Amino acid sequence: MSALAGIVGFRGYSGQELISLLERHPRVQPVLMEHRADPEDRPRQRGFQAPQRIAATPEAVHQAGLDVVFLATPPEVSMELALPFLEAGAKVVDLSGAFRLRTVENYKRWYKEAHTQPGLLKEAVYGLPEFNREAIRGARMISNPGCYPTAASLAVQPLVEAGVVDLAAGIVCDAKSGVSGAGRKPSLKTHFCEVTENFSAYSILDHRHVAEVLQNTGLEESQFSFTAQLLPIHRGILETIYFRASRMTSAEDLLAIYEGRYAGEPFVRLYDAGKVPDLSAVAHTNFCDIGVRFDSATGRGVIVTVIDNLVKGAAGQAIQNMNLILGFGETEGLL
């Protein structure tokens, strides 16, 4: 019998990606949850069979017997809905930033808003399976990581953990994303005429995703510099990460650290020493690809890491987490 997965925010880019992936999942049936009136459904071909729709209420969650609910919603909406849905008997995977940081003080600093569910903030498990798999399995509330922090944390944390980064020299992360990362709601910044034939940086020195990387890696803010940039493409994130290494003599040494850390991980792929991935390698997949270059004469290292921001950076990782909390195979519906 199929599990039932509700989706709130199904009209957004992450929500649409969830629908597409779940419709191919062998053990899950998507259910669309209406949170607010919105007539802007996409046109469909004649004969298209849309998923079931229900109201986004605790009563509807209980009556439908939903096993899990995905919240592809703004943080304030996720804070409003998460606890009632949990009390109605569903597990929750939240794709917003509402529950990613561990304290209300940290949330207030980076999101510039007060947190309205401090108890649930403490309970939520950060859903990066490569770092937190066993805690995810037993959780009822998962906070899906941000897209930029997913790529950055998977690239940086093994090197920091191994103690081979010269932290006094700092780490610089130069990150580029496709426009879908900004969400479907239109703004001047994401208007076609502003994006096409253009390339721009934003949220310099104060991007809210920095807090997640610091939390995942143990770095201090003074040790990590991050700049986000908007590519004139639909999807994809490429991060070029610069650092100085100690006790390393070659790219093979660095690669060995990643091989040890990610042995057996189904969604992390490494490249031969000196080779690096590009965006086309991960488009429409749940993979994170990592490549390393290193100059032994100067100790300079460069990591290039890529993900699809709508899959491993959002909907795909959310399904990876769903598979874990429902006891399914972690790769089901994703490979």
Image (tube, rainbow, N blue to C red):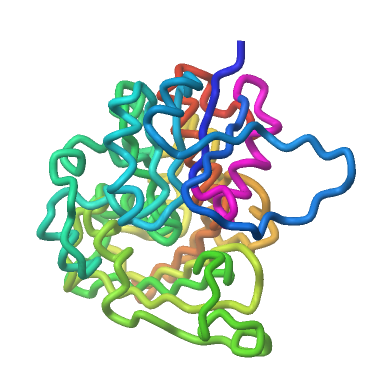
Q: Position of residue 106 (x, y in %)?
A: 15, 60
Q: Position of residue 279 (x, y in %)?
A: 64, 62
Q: Does residue 230 lie above or below 41 as drawn?
A: below
Residue 3 vs 188, above or below: the answer is above
Q: Is residue 124 left or right of residue 265?
A: left
Using the image, determine if residue 58 lies above or below residue 249: above
Asked if one can make out residue 92 in the rendered structure from this viewpoint, the answer is yes
Between 77 and 165, the residue placed more toward the observer is 77
| Placement of 29 over or under 32, stated as above or below | above
Residue at x 52% of width, y 85% of height: 188
Q: Where does residue 274 sit, x and y in percent of width and height?
A: 56, 62
> What number of labels is visible?
0
Asked if one can make out residue 247 in the rendered structure from this viewpoint, the answer is no
Instruction: Indicate the quadrant containing the C terminus: top left, top right, bottom left or bottom right.
Output: top right
The quadrant holding residue 105 is: bottom left
Q: Is residue 217 left or right of residue 250?
A: left
Question: In the image, what residue occupies the spot 40% across and 38% down?
Answer: 93
Q: Residue furthest top?
A: 1
The magenta segment is 9-28
Q: Residue furthest left?
A: 105
Locate residue 144, reporting x and y percent: 39, 45
Q: Residue at x 27, y 36 (%)?
A: 83
Q: Residue shown at 22%/52% (left/top)?
A: 101
